[in-house]
Image (cartoon, rainbow, N blue to C red):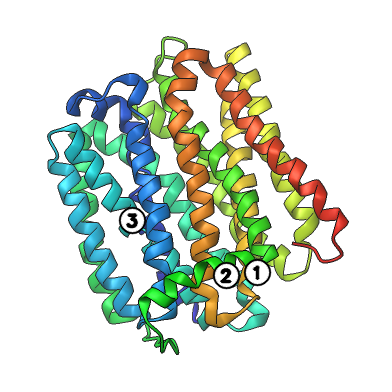
Amino acid sequence: MSGALIFLFAFAAGAAVANIYYVQPLIGLIGPDIGLSPVLASLMVTFTQVGYAIGLLLLVPLGDLVENRRLVVLTLLAVSASLAISALAGSEPAFLAAALVLGGCAVVAQMLVPFAATLSPEAHRGATVGKVVSGVMTGILLARPVASLIADLAGWRAVFGLAAILMACLAALLRWNLPMRRPEGGFAYRRLIASLWPVWRDTTILRRRALYQAAMFAAFSLFWTTVPLLLASPAFGWGQRGIAVFALAGAAGALVSPVAGRVADRGWTRSATGSALFLVLFSFVVAALGVVVGSIALLVAAAILLDVGCILNLVLGQRAIYVLGPEIRSRLNALYMASAFFGGAVGSAIASAVYVHGGWIATSCAGAGFAAVALLYYCSEFFHARPA
């Protein structure tokens, strides 16, 4: 794994996963255009995340069965097509259907992470995973400011149209630059999917790490779905450009990914996990205080703390499960990330309703509640001899 190849993996994974986050800062623009009420507007985010979770369970496991480069390229082309449909959608059903398919195909990012881990030697696997996940998280965190800026200049449909072109170009780039990888496979797709339940049932570390990350992504999605609404409200009165700058500040959290990988390689997973979960809980305390005193600086600090905590826990979890068996690595990653995005879907599903009916304080309490549940579960880890 040369530095250039790791960068290509990271860029491709980040660009792919960014597609499911473009909608978050744009729900206030897209909703009225396609006929969604403010209370239901966050369904656009939910449909994308539910599609992503479904794709994780049905498509990502194919990495253990079929040639990886071909799988990645074909899935990217499907992403490009669904983005084009989103850009042209003129009604609520059309956009939501495209969002579901887009989410399902954007899981190509999670095909690339275990692909990179398999090509990397054991001693450096955590660092490699951390760098690729850094690309994933950079894509997630930059998606919002990029979408806001493009929408401010050319409208929300331009965001999806340009993304469709980028994905088609990226598919061609990866076709010519990624190495081929043929897994041993040797069994049918039905058997592959049926094996997901035994893998989940029999892998304690996977279940624990997945539940941690589900709570983290629920809090993460809740915050980033509602904070654009808060910033656009009379309390702050920001436009799309200001919201983009705010999201860009939060993107600083992506810098923690390579550090998290090295921490995991050194065996500090348990203590680092507790720190990550606490950071997310504390971030919502800071976020609530920021609105009470009317401080943008505190809101920015909360966003950075939240992103750092979520990314740190994500990388620690992936490093922990990738040592369990290379022959099932794609399935392990599929189950881990599907759990995370189901959590994210829950967070986004309640986001608009909680914010509309309870304001920012209720939103902060809900986010802190997700983190508190994860911390309580984390405490039970000290009754086990082996860290998770």
- Residue position marked by numbered label 3 in the rendering: 104
Q: Residues within 10 Å of mark 1 (few under 14, many from 20)?
A: few
Whichever of labels 3 and 1 marks the residue nearer the N terminus, that label is: 3
Which quadrant of the figure has residue 295?
top right
Q: Where's the C terminus, which quadrant?
A: bottom right
Q: Residues within 10 Å of mark 3 (few under 14, many from 20)?
A: many
**Mark sitting on residue 198:** 2
**Mark sitting on residue 59:** none
Which quadrant of the figure has residue 22?
top left
Q: Secondary structure at mark 1?
A: helix
> Residue 282 at what x, y percent from top left?
70, 33
Please count the marks in the image: 3
State whether residue 51 is above or below residue 117. Answer: above
Alpha carbon distance from label 2 to label 1: 6 Å
- Residue position marked by numbered label 1 in the rendering: 202
Q: Residues within 10 Å of mark 2 (few under 14, many from 20)?
A: few
User: Which circle, 2 or 3, is nearer the viewer?
Assistant: 2
Are the residues at dot 3 and dot 1 in contact (C-beta closer than 8 Å)? no
Give amino acid for label 1.
Answer: Asp
Q: Secondary structure at mark 3?
A: helix
Which quadrant of the figure has residue 236?
top left
Does residue 140 appear to the left or right of 204 in the view shown? left
Q: Secondary structure at mark 2?
A: helix
Give amino acid for label 3.
Answer: Gly
Are the residues at dot 2 and dot 1 in contact (C-beta closer than 8 Å)? yes
